[in-house]
Image (spheres, rainbow, N blue to C red):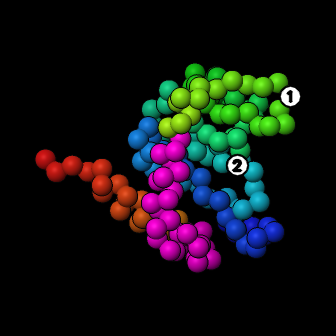
Amino acid sequence: ALGRSRGGFTSKLHCLADALGRPLAFHLTVGKAADCKAYDALIRLPERAPDALLADKGYDADAIRADLAERKIEAVIPGRSNRRVKIKHDRTLYKQRNRIERMFGHLKINRAIATRYDQLANSFLGMVHLATARYWLKFVHAA
């Protein structure tokens, strides 16, 4: 999952998270791949269908919006700047997407994730899963 781009070898880590910003699943793609390519892999994963999908402009595609409408999931995705017909989205709900960005910040405290030392995707995803387990521990309450 390493792809060459102008910055060198890179990869993208896509995450499916719950409403509290807790990671549920990850998908790794090459750095030059479009964000919308990870949609199919991630949307099949949750056991229960979400009420809304919050995503950035990289996921703004008519096919994704049509699939979400078919699944009866609200698409909270801002439109790209080059879109001819502007699409409205719920701005107050979209503000909750910062929880996912903060989760990525917590995961990148681990230097191995922030700089992607691992050559193999399995090794890198293993480190991501270890960091995710550490992140989930703060949500566990003792009875």
The answer to if 40 sits in the magenta stretch is no
Please, is residue 118 above or below residue 106 in the view? below
- Residue occupying the point 52% across, 45% down: 98
**Secondary structure, magenta segment, majority class:** helix
Q: Report the Cα–Cα distance between label 1 and label 2.
A: 20 Å
User: Mark 2 — residue?
Assistant: 35
Q: Earlier in the sequence, mark 1 or mark 2?
A: 2
34 or 94: which is nearer to us? Answer: 94
Q: Say which mark, if any, is on residue 140.
A: none
Whether residue 12 is visible here, answered yes or no, is yes
**Seen in the image, is 38 located left or right of residue 140?**
right
The answer to if 116 sits in the magenta stretch is yes
User: Mark 1 — residue?
Assistant: 84
Eye-nearest disc, 1 or 2 = 1
The percent position of residue 4, horizontal first and vertical second, equals 78, 69
**Seen in the image, is 130 located left or right of residue 43?**
left
Q: Magenta part of the protein: which range?
A: 97-124
The percent position of residue 140, horizontal first and vertical second, equals 26, 51
Whether residue 52 is visible here, answered yes or no, is no
- Residue occupying the point 72% across, 62% down: 31
* Amino acid bearing label 2: Asp
Please, is residue 106 above or below residue 90 in the view? below
Count residues near mark 2 (Cα–Cα under 10 Å), then give few for <14, some for 14-19, many for 20+: some
Quadrant, the N terminus: bottom right
* Amino acid bearing label 1: Arg
- Residue occupying the point 76% across, 30% down: 62
The percent position of residue 38, horizontal first and vertical second, equals 66, 48
